[in-house]
Image (spheres, rainbow, N blue to C red):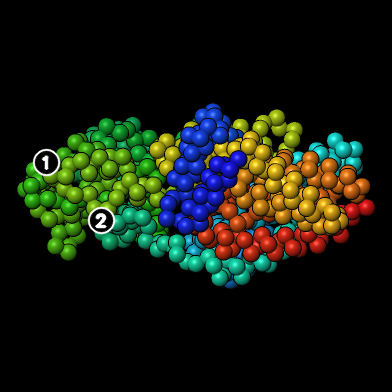
Amino acid sequence: MYITIAILILSTIFFVNGKVRSDIVSLCAMLALMLFQIVTPEEALSGFSNPVVVMMIGLFVVGGAIFQTGLAKSISSRILSLAGKSETRLYFLVMIVTAFFGAFVSNTGTVAVMMPIIVSLASSAGISASRLLMPLAFASSMGGMMTLLGTPPNLIIASALETAGRPALSFFSFLPSGLVCVTVGTLVLWPLSKWYLSKKNEVSEQQSTNGKTPAQLIQEYGLADNLFRIKVLGNSIAKGRTLAQLDLRNKYSVNILEVRRSDVKRHRFFKTIPQQLASAEMKLNEGDMLYVSGRISDVTTMVDNMHFEFVDEHETEVAVKHGKAMDFYDIGIAELLIMPSSSFINKNIKEAGYRDKFDINVLGIRRKGEYILHELGEEQIHYGDVLLVQGTWANITRLTQESTNWIVLGQPQDEAASITLNHKAPLVAVIMIAMIAAMVFDFIPIAPVTAVIAAALLMVLTGCFRNISAAYKTINWESIMLIGGMMPLSTALEKTGTSELISHSLVNICGQFGPMALMVGIYMATSVMTMFISNTATAVLLTPIALQSAQQMDVGPEPFLFAVSVGASMCFASPFSTPPNALVMPAGQYTFIDYIKVGLPLQIIMAIVMILVLPLIFPFS
């Protein structure tokens, strides 16, 4: 017992100190428990197979897909339109929406779904995400107090009351106390978040890349003035012929950048934008959309001769300048700086064979401040030239291996990751709604963890990420290690009798001063224990003690049991007391001390208010 307490105290000291990463502290605590044989290796490692931890992994992937497809930005823009430019209005709107969802969906699921939306919302509003993410986590826990299914401790006390022969709790029996929690928490948290949650994690919107974005390159090279969308008609002489046979580049001095081909039969319900890089052997079909660059006179001649059709002819320049006509889902653009050692120097673009060797197109050349966009085939390559190239993001990334010939400016991989797959947003929305429905409705025979795993896999299998690596990158392993590593400490506290000793001692001391004092003791014991073990484990441990104490004093057990549920759920002073607290920790760049500064005052004020309110809602008689 004493060794377990020592490990708990040392872990807390390191958490508060903040000089050692929280996940390392958690894993060291787990290792110490194994070395001292307080828990078995199986018990120590069981945390990583716990459904809560597995759900967190899946929810990270789901949240990543919501962000990657632009769904987060779409939803956040709607919320922002309601909030306007007022940070105060935005804060209260986030708290109300989150608390509402938290009442019907698990608080972990609520935070995972809302977190990418809040990050996008904060970016659009020009405020620090840290000002909203911790309130988001706390609001989900407060909202969970409003319904029977909102949080596990509610179910635990409802079961205990039914077993004891008391009237069963309905779905909204928790609503009065829950509304008090949401109201008090929202009002108290507003000044605390303004005082203590600084703008330290505010990131410039300049992106994570060191190079220029595709939209910036389009504008810089003037492609907006030379880009046109052309449609292949049914009577076109190009129909059924390859681009090599048509030889459009040489005949008309135009460059076919890409082809977009709709597939209505296969994708009846979701918008798709299949992009294909123009290749010599590609055959043109009726309805194909060609993205063409060149002089307007040359392009017009080609359209007339080939029986093509301009699409949005008069709006092309404006559309491209605003990034609406040219997208970069699968195909991107980048710049190559030609090195002195390059074997391509003094070769013209046609001889260099970029399309044959690297499957990329050269769109333009920047040379000594001038931009060359037309008749590139015969243009010789010089040392110091910067080539604007186009290809799939994978092929552009492979160009980095040719370091003796050129340097790829910027970070293509990071740039590709930053491009949102907007056409997949409806699909993500459907998967997310199905996941939430499975978690909310009892008639759907699917466990929450199963629903989350299924949703995460569907996000990957349906192409909501560019590849599986992108999905893995959305998982924050620090949070996973933190929660999984701390769960064995909870087991150790129960196994060694430490938790039971603390709870019994507090109840015995307080019980002699009457039911009100006993309820205070139960609430405070629950609140303190939840800082170190999960709220579910705390509720399981203290519910029978609270029930037995009420029976011994011959008073109604409801206020005591609700004190357990509220005390277990309203724990804000620790990042690992609840999964939502841990989920927002890395995204908000919070330290342990941040939770103490903001969460501890809120937890104390919440305790005082609820201790006074609970006997009014649920009398002792």
Residue at the (34%, 35%) spot, across then down: 284
Residue 216 in view of the camera: yes
Residue at the (47%, 66%) spot, across then down: 199
Q: Are marks 1 and 2 in contact (CB under 8 Å)?
A: no
Residue at the far left in the pictured view: 346
Q: In this orientation, which residue lies closer to the viewer: 166 or 129?
A: 166
Q: In this orientation, which residue lies closer to the viewer: 450 or 325?
A: 450
Question: Which quarter of the figure has residue 3?
Answer: top right
Q: Mark 1 and mark 2: span between their CA atoms? A: 23 Å
Whole-percent x and y of residue 523? 74, 53
In the rendered image, the quadrant that contains the N terminus is top right
Q: Which is more N-terminal, label 2 or label 1? A: 2
Whole-percent x and y of residue 34? 50, 34
Disc 1 packing (10 Å; few <14; some 14–19; many ≥20): few
Classify residue 574 as left or right of residue 222.
right
Q: Which residue is mark 1?
A: 351
Question: Which quarter of the figure has residue 355?
Answer: top left
Task: Give, as a three-letter code, the residue at label 2.
Answer: Arg
Q: Helix or strand or loop: what does disc 1 sit on?
A: helix
Q: Which residue is mark 2?
A: 295
Picture layout, residue 293 above or below residue 463:
below
Classify residue 168 as left or right of residue 284.
right
Task: Give, as a three-letter code, the residue at label 1.
Answer: Glu
Residue 145 in view of the camera: no
Whole-percent x and y of residue 366? 18, 58
Residue at the (87%, 41%) spot, across then down: 168
Q: In this orientation, which residue lies closer to the viewer: 279 or 445?
A: 445
Residue at the (74%, 35%) spot, across then down: 442
Which marked residue is nearer to the observer: mark 1 or mark 2?
A: 1
